[in-house]
Image: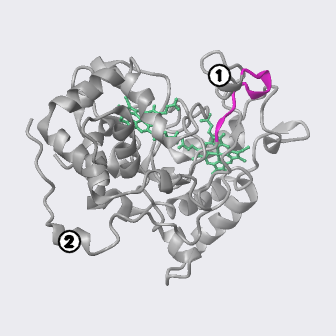
């Protein structure tokens, strides 16, 4: 496979802010420490190539982009759970990668707290890319194209795993998605909600925003939203903390672009937003760690009528940022 250079001429990209990470006015402050790994054109384009390169996996069939698909906000709409080397299946749904520079922890259970280390997991996981860091680095050092690109980006003689991880982070921190209809309404950029969306917004604030908070639509906490009565299949946050209080708690996911990223929940059990809303309205299951926000007296769940369900979904669709999925900077360079 001979990697081709991306099509657009340098004149298209150098004079503008294509390689400056954006801090949208309505977002909390970014968590990624850019001072330790500033984004450069060379580093970003290298990260992009790595992200789309199947040679990073053990048998050279799987790249990051096999599971993280740009048109789906870098989630995987085709598979319920991670689907990697040799058709092996994992246990968790592939999350969207929008606004990763604003997240303070990663994975459904918060098992990683720095973006730079996250790819190690995918690269070395038996079910995902089934490689070793030594082997990935060895392969890259053998490829003249990468020797040249790493040298240009980091100015070191030999490629090492830190440069690899820094390049991937430089690519991913640029995944800022802040141009949905919602943003344009909130920032007063000339768009208006329809009557249905506005009603949905009010319902969302009242019923959902205690967890799906801020303009990232997550408070970053771990909660049990009542999917199961026992947690033998996946104990969630308690895998990391070993606390029984954390059994069945999972990270509150951002809802940005969520209309593009079915299936839903940590195990991809729901296919549609209708099913998600029906879960909250009628199917919340009891267990010792179920979130207090989902309990009132003896009853469980969030009261939502069928009409309210439609309005909430209309609002959620205003969180879809079509420009993000089409942004050429993030497309396959090969
Ligand atoms: C086989 C599918 C698959 C491949 C290949 C894959 N990922 Fe993932 N990725 C996942 C799944 C599933 C998770 C969630 C894992 C968990 O929560 O335990 C995830 C989580 C992540 C996250 C954390 C998102 C968050 O906020 O929780 C990042 C960042 C990420 N992957 C980047 C990458 C990069 C970079 C590569 C390539 C080196 C890659 N992934 C390859 C499936 C995949
Ligand atoms: C008590 C906190 C809490 C409340 C209240 C809450 N959620 Fe959630 N939500 C979560 C958690 C935690 C998850 C992930 C659970 C898992 O996968 O195990 C989630 C998952 C979701 C998902 C799936 C996202 C994905 O990428 O898979 C959607 C959609 C969603 N919630 C919408 C809503 C809506 C709409 C409301 C209001 C009717 C709401 N939530 C209320 C905590 C909450």
User: Dot 2: few (<14), some (14–19), or many (≥20) neighbours within 10 Å?
Assistant: few
Does 248 appear in magenta?
yes
The answer to whether mark 2 is within 8 Å of ligand 1 is no
Q: Position of residue 217 (x, y in %)?
A: 61, 55
Q: Position of residue 252 (x, y in %)?
A: 64, 43
Determine whether, in the image, residue 165 is placed left or right of residue 113. left
Q: Closer to the camera: disc 2 or disc 1?
A: 2
* Cα–Cα gap, marks 2 and 1: 47 Å
Does 16 appear in magenta?
no
User: Dot 1: few (<14), some (14–19), or many (≥20) neighbours within 10 Å?
Assistant: some
User: Which residue is the site of mark 2?
Assistant: 12
Q: Position of residue 43 (x, y in %)?
A: 31, 51
Quadrant of the image where one finds ligand 1: top left
Q: Quick check: 97 above or below 256?
A: above
Q: Position of residue 31 (x, y in %)?
A: 58, 53
User: Which residue is the site of mark 1?
Assistant: 239
Q: Quick check: 318 above or below 294?
A: below
Magenta segment boundaries in residue numbering:
242-251
- Residue at screen point 66% across, 58% down: 308
Determine whether, in the image, residue 236 is placed left or right of residue 40. right
- Residue at screen point 28% across, 34% down: 63
- Residue at screen point 62% across, 62% down: 28
């Amino acid at each position: 496979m001979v990697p081709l250079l991306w099509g657009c001429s340098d004149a298209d990209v150098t004079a503008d802010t294509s390689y400056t990470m954006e801090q949208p006015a309505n977002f909390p402050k970014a968590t990624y420490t850019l001072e330790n790994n500033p984004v450069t054109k060379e580093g970003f384009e290298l990260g992009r190539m790595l992200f789309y390169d199947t040679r990073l996996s053990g048998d050279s069939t799987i790249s990051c982009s096999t599971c993280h698909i740009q048109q789906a906000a870098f989630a995987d709409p085709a598979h319920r759970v991670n689907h990697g080397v040799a058709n092996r299946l994992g246990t968790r749904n592939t999350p969207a990668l929008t606004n990763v520079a604003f997240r303070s922890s990663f994975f459904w259970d918060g098992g990683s707290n720095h973006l730079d280390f996250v790819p190690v997991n995918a690269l070395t996981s038996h079910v995902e890319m089934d490689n070793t860091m030594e082997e990935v680095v060895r392969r890259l050092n053998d490829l003249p194209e990468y020797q040249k690109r790493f040298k240009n980006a980091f100015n070191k003689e030999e490629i090492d795993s830190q440069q690899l991880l820094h390049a991937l982070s430089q690519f991913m921190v640029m995944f800022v998605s802040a141009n949905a209809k919602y943003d344009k309404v909130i920032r007063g950029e000339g768009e208006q909600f329809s009557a249905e969306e506005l009603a949905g917004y009010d319902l969302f604030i009242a019923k959902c925003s205690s967890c799906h908070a801020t303009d990232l639509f997550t408070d970053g906490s771990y909660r049990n939203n009542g999917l199961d009565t026992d947690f033998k299949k996946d104990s969630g946050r308690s895998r990391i903390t070993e606390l029984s209080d954390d059994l069945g708690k999972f990270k509150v996911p951002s809802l940005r672009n969520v209309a593009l990223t079915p299936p839903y929940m940590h195990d991809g059990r729901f296919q549609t937003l209708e099913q998600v809303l029906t879960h909250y309205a009628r199917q919340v299951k009891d267990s010792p760690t179920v979130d207090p926000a989902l309990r009132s007296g003896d009853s469980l769940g969030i009261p939502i009528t069928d009409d309210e369900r439609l309005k909430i979904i209309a609002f959620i669709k205003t969180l879809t940022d079509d420009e993000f999925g089409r942004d050429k900077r993030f497309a396959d360079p090969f």
